[in-house]
Amino acid sequence: MPMSLQELQNKPSVLRGDKVTKIFGYGTNKNTAVNEVNFNFRESEVVSIVGESGSGKTTLAKMVLGLIGVTEGNIFFRDTLRDISSHKKKKEYWKGIQAVFQDPFSAFNMFNRIDTLLLDCINLMGGKKLPKEEKVRLMTDACSFVNLKYEELTNKYPFELSGGQMQRLMIARIFLLKPKILIADEPTSMVDACSRATILDMLLKLRDEVNMTIIFITHDIGLAYYVSDTVYIMEHGQFVETGTAEDVILNPQAEYTKRLISDVPKIHEEWDLSTVAGL
Ligand SMILES: Nc1ncnc2c1ncn2[C@@H]1O[C@H](COP(=O)(O)OP(=O)(O)OP(=O)(O)O)[C@@H](O)[C@H]1O
Ligand SMILES: [Mg+2]
C-alpha cells in the first residue's frame, strides 16, 4: 500500500534539494541538464523519477550521490547541509546513500573477486575487525537474501556471472550496507520480466526491513505507478509535475505527463499485480 501524503509528511526528511542545478559546458556548448529542481524525500518513501531520455535523471542522481559537482543549489542530508568536501566526508556520506546502476558491468571492479567486493562492504560498515566466521556468515546471509549461493560465488569474478546474477549481487551489497537511501537507476532494464519482479520485490522488502528510502529512476511510468508513493516527472531538466503516484498518474495535470501516460495504454490492467509481478 502506498503511503498517503499525510503519512509521508510526518516522516523525517532524508534528502532535500533546493534549486539543484547542473550546467555542462560553456558558451555555445552550455547545456543546463538539471535546472533548479526542488525535492524532499522522506524516510522509507519510494520515489520514482520519470522522464524521457536526456531529461536529466542520471545527472540528478549523480549529483545526489556526490559523483559530480552541483553547479548551483543545495542538498541537505537528514536536514543538514551536505558536506562532501573531503574524501573522508564523502566516504561517510556513502554509508548513508548508495546506488544500483543501469549497467551492472560498470558497477564492479572486474578484477576483484566477489568475496572481496562483499568484504569491502563489511569493512566500510566498520566490521573490519570481526572474526572471519562472522564475516562469512554476513556474506552468506546477504547472498541468500538475493537467492545466490555464497559457496558457489566465493572464488569467482564478477565477469563470470550472468547479468541477472550481477544485479542480485548489487542488491546483496546493499543488504550489507543498509544505506538510508538507495538510488536505482533502471536496475531492471537488462533482465527478463521475471527477474525484474524479483529484484523489485527484494528492494521493496529491504525498504520494509530497514526503512530505506528508494529512488527509482525510470522511463517506465507503469513501473512508477506500481512501486512508488510519490512520482516526480522530469522534462528538460525540470520537474514538471510532482505528487502521489495516484494523483500524478491517474489525474495528470501537465501535458508532458499526459503524453507519457498515453504511451502506456491501459495502465491499470497492464500493471495488475498478478499479471506483472507474478508475486
Ligand atoms: N558528462 C557530461 N558532459 C556533458 N553533458 C552531459 C554529461 N552527462 C550528461 N550530459 C547531458 O545532460 C543531459 C541529461 O543527461 P542524463 O544522462 O542525465 O539523461 P537521462 O534522463 O538519464 O537519460 P536516459 O533516460 O537516456 O538515461 C543530456 O543532454 C546529456 O547529453
Ligand atoms: Mg540515465
Image (tube, rainbow, N blue to C red):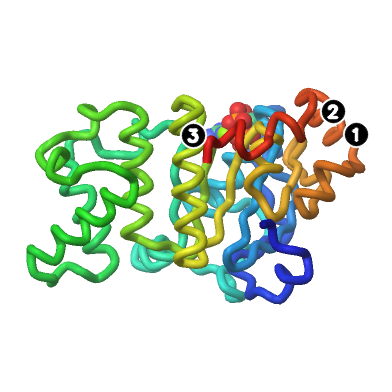
Q: Are marks 3 and 1 in contact (CB under 8 Å)?
A: no
Residue type, mark 3 in image? Arg
Asked if the residue under mark 2 is in contact with the one under mark 1, i.e. CB atoms within 8 Å, the reply is yes
Earlier-in-chain disc, 2 versus 3: 3
| Tag nearer the camera, 3 or 1 | 3
- List the residue tagged with mark 2: 259
Q: Are marks 2 and 3 in contact (CB under 8 Å)?
A: no
Q: Position of residue 172 (x, y in %)?
A: 32, 50
Distance from disc 3 to disc 1, alpha carbons, whole Å, reads 30 Å
- The response on whether ligand 1 sits within 8 Å of label 2 is no
Q: Is residue 205 left or right of residue 275?
A: left
User: Residue drawn 63% across and 75% down?
Assistant: 12
Quadrant of residue 93 within the rendered picture:
bottom left
Residue hosting label 3? 196
On the rendering, which quadrant does ligand 1 occupy?
top right
Element type where label 2 sits in the image: helix
Q: Is residue 52 visible?
A: yes
Residue 45 pos. (x, y %): 62, 61
Q: Earlier in the sequence, mark 3 or mark 1?
A: 3
Q: Which residue occupies 17% across, 60% down? A: 137
Residue drawn 83% across the image and 36% down it: 257
The residue that disc 1 covers is 255
